[in-house]
Image (spheres, coloured by chain):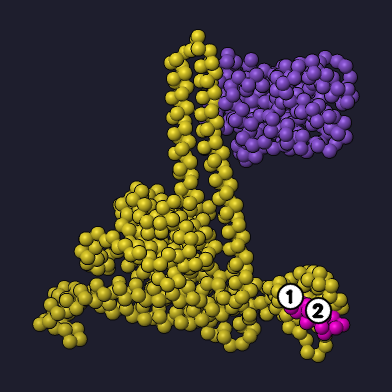
Chain colours: A purple, B yellow
Amino acid sequence: MRIVIAEDSAVIRAGLKEILADRGHEIVAAVGDAEALLKAVETHDPDVAIVDVRMPPHHTDEGLRAAIAIRRAYPKVGILVFSQYIETRYASDLLSMRSGGVGYLLKDRVADVTEFTDAITRVAAGGTALDPEVVTGLLRATRHTAVLDALTARERDVLALMAEGRSNAAIADRFKVSERAVEKHVGNIFAKLGLPPSDEDHRRVLAVLAFIGER
Amino acid sequence: MTETARTPETAASSVRRALAAPFTKRAWAELGYTVTSFLLAVAAVTFIVPMLENGIFWAVSTTPVRKLGTAARFLARAQLGEDIPAPPPLRPVSYVKVATPDAAVAAGLAKTVAAAGGRAREWETKPGLTTSYLPPSQVAGLAAAAGVAFTAVVPRNELANYFGTRIRDSAGWRARAYFLVKLPLAALAMSVIAVRWAGGLFLVTFPAWRALGLRGFGGLGADNSLAAVLLGILLLFSAPWATHALTRADLWLMRGLLVGSGSSAQRIQVLEQSRARVVDDSAARLRGIERDLHDGTQAQLVAVAMKLGLARDKLYDPSSVDLARVTQLVEDAHRGALEAIADLRTLARGIHPPVLDNGLADALATLADRSAVPVELITDIQERPSAAIETIAYFSAAELLANVARHSGARRATLEAVHVPGLLRVRVTDDGAGGAKPTQNGGLRGLAERVRTVDGRIEISSPHGGPTTVTVELPSHA
C-alpha cells in the first residue's frame, strides 16, 4: 500500500516508517504538519493517510481538520486518525460523513504491530477501525437513543465490535459463541437499523455509521 | 540552618574593590546620574513651586508633573539600570449624581458603589448621592442591578471631572513631594562632586599646579604639598562612596514617592491583576507540562512500544528469526526507554525539585553546583519560609543563574539567599557585560510577574559594562 504519514513527533514518525516498511508498505511521504499533509495527498494520491490529531502550529486539532478536508476532496483515500487522547467529539466529526474508509486509534495501539497494520488495511479497503475507547465513548453518548434502545445488550456489544472493525469470526471468538450466532445478531442489527439488503461489508459500515450518526 | 561558603580571597578582594571604586563603571554612572538628576530637579522645582499657587494651577500641572516623574524614572533606568515601576495612570474621577426618592435607597447604593471600588458621598439636603471613580454606565448598572429606584443618573460636567481627576491624583502630589525633597539632596550630591571629586583631583595634582606657577591655595604652600596630595587621594577615594550613598538615598526616595500609592482602591486593582497573573501563570505552566509530556515522554514511550511490538512479532515465528534485526530493535527500544526516563526526570525537577524538600539552602547548593558559571554561594536561612516562597525563590535563582550562563559572559557569579524575619532576599551578582533588562516575554519579565504574585519585588541593577545585580525580595509567608 502507498501511505502518507503526518505526525509532528520525529520519534513516532520514524517508528511508524520502520513498522510499515517492515510490513512491505510504501511510505510515499512523511510530513510534520497539516499543510504539508494536504500537499502530500494531492501529489501522491495514496491509499491511506495516517494523521496525528495534534500538529503545529496550534497543537489542537489541525490534523483532524485536515483529515476532514481530505475526506471531502479525496473520498477514495482511507484516513486513519490517531492521537494520544480520545476525544469523542473528534471521532463523530470525522465519522459524520457517511462513508467508510476511516479509522480512529489511540497511539498506544501502534505497539500491536499486526493489529495496527490490519487496521490500516481495513481502512484502505473502505472499512472502519475504531479504537475500543472511541466505541465506548460513543456508546456512552448514544445510550438513550431510540435506535440503540431497540437492540438487545448482546446486539449492542456486537455492534461495538463491528465499529472497531472486527470480523464475525473475531467477534465469535471474543464472545466464545459460534460464528452462526454472531451472523444472526448481525442480521438482527441490520434489520433493526433498517438497512436494506446489499453487500455485507457495506452494510456493516452503514450499521456502524448509523449508530454513530444517532448521537 | 546557616551555611556560609566564602572563598578565602574575599578579604583581599574587598580591599581591591575599595581601591578600584573610583574607577568602576558604576561609579561613573552614578556621577553622571548625580549631574543629570540635579538638572532635572532644578527644572522640576522651578516649575512646581509657582504652580502651587492655586487649585487651577494644581490641576493643569498634574500631567506635566507626572511627566517629570517619568523623566526621573527614565534617568534611573538609563543611567543606573534601576527599574522603578511607574504609578498607575491617571484614574478619571467621573462624578455621577444619582437622585433617588428615598434616603435609605441612597445609603444602599452608596455601599454598593464602595464595594465596586468607587467612592460615594450622600447628599445632606435631599436623598441622593454623588459617586466618583466609576463610569456613569457602571453606576447606572449597579443601581439597576440592586433594584434601586433612582430618578436620575447624571454625569457631572466634564470640567468638574477634569479638575477632580487631576487635583485628587495622589501620584501627582507624590511626584511634587519627591522633587521638593530631591532638590536639596541633589544639591548636596553636587557639593560632594565639587569637594570630593573636583577638590580631590585638584589636591592630587597640586604639585603640578605649583609647577605651573600657582603660589599657594588657602593654607597650602610649598611645605605641605605632600599633605595636599594625601588629602586629595583620601577625598578622591571617598568620593564614590559618598556619591553612592546619596544615589541610594535618592532611589529609596523614588521607590517611596514615584511609584503607586497605597490607596485601597489601587491596592484592590493591584491584587486583582496579580490574581489574574497567578491564574494565567499556573494555567500556562500546566499547559507547558502537558506539552512536554505529550511531545517528549509520551512520544518516546510510544516509539519504544512500537519497536518492542515489532520485535515481538518477529520472535513469534521461531523458524525464521532475523536475530540481528531483533537485537537492533530491542537495543533501540532500550535506548528510547532510557531517554524517556531522563526526560521524565528533567520534567519532574521542573515541576518541583525534590531537593527543595530538604530546604532552600540545599536546593540552592545543588543549583549552584550545576551552574555552568562558577557560583559562590552564601546562604543564611535560620527559619524556613513557606513552601510557596521557597519554590518561587528557587525558580528565581534558577532563572537568574541561567541568564548569567546564557547572556552575561560572566566568569563568576555570587548567589546569596538571606532570610531575615518577614523577608527572604535572593541576590545574584555576576561580573559579566551588564545591560540586562526585562523584555517582552523575556525570562526577567516572567520572573518579575511571578514575584509580584506574592507581593515580592525585584530590583535589577545592570549598567552597560556590568556588573549585574538582581535582587528578589519575597515575603516569608504567602
Q: Is residue B108 magenta?
A: yes
Instruction: Give me the residue at 58% from left, 88% from top.
Output: B53
Residue occupying the far bottom of the picture:
B125
B17 or A169: nearer the viewer: A169
Residue B240: % across, % down: 30, 72
Q: Position of residue B19 (x, y in %)?
A: 22, 67
Per the image, label 2 sits on a secondary structure element best described as strand
For the image shown, how many numbered marks are present on the structure? 2
- The dot on residue B113 is 1
| Chain that bears disc 2 | B
Q: Give the residue displayed 64% in from the left and 37% down from the top.
A: A85
Residue B229 badge = none
Q: Nearer the viewer, residue B289 or B185?
A: B289
Residue kind at label 1, given as amino acid type: Val
**Would residue B357 appear left or right of B26 to someone viewing this image?**
right
**Can residue B392 be seen in this snapshot?**
yes
Q: In the rendered structure, which segment of residues is drawn in magenta? A: B96-112
The residue type indicated by label 2 comes to Val
Of tags 2 and 1, the one toward the viewer is 1
Give neighbour class at mark 2: few <14, some 14-19, many 20+ (Cα, 10 Å): many
Determine whether the residue tagged by mark 1 lies in a helix, strand or loop: helix
Residue B62 visible in this rendered orientation of the protein: no
Callouts 2 and 1 in the same chain: yes
Q: Is residue A106 above or below residue B62?
A: above
Q: Is residue B321 magenta?
A: no
Disc 2 marks which residue?
Answer: B98
Tell me what residue is drawn at x 33 percent, y 80 percent. B191
Q: Quadrant of the N terminus of chain B?
A: bottom left
* Label whose residue precedes the other's in the sequence (2 or 1): 2
The vertical placement of B148 against B453, above or below, is below
Query: Is residue B346 found left or right of A78 in the rendered image?
Result: left
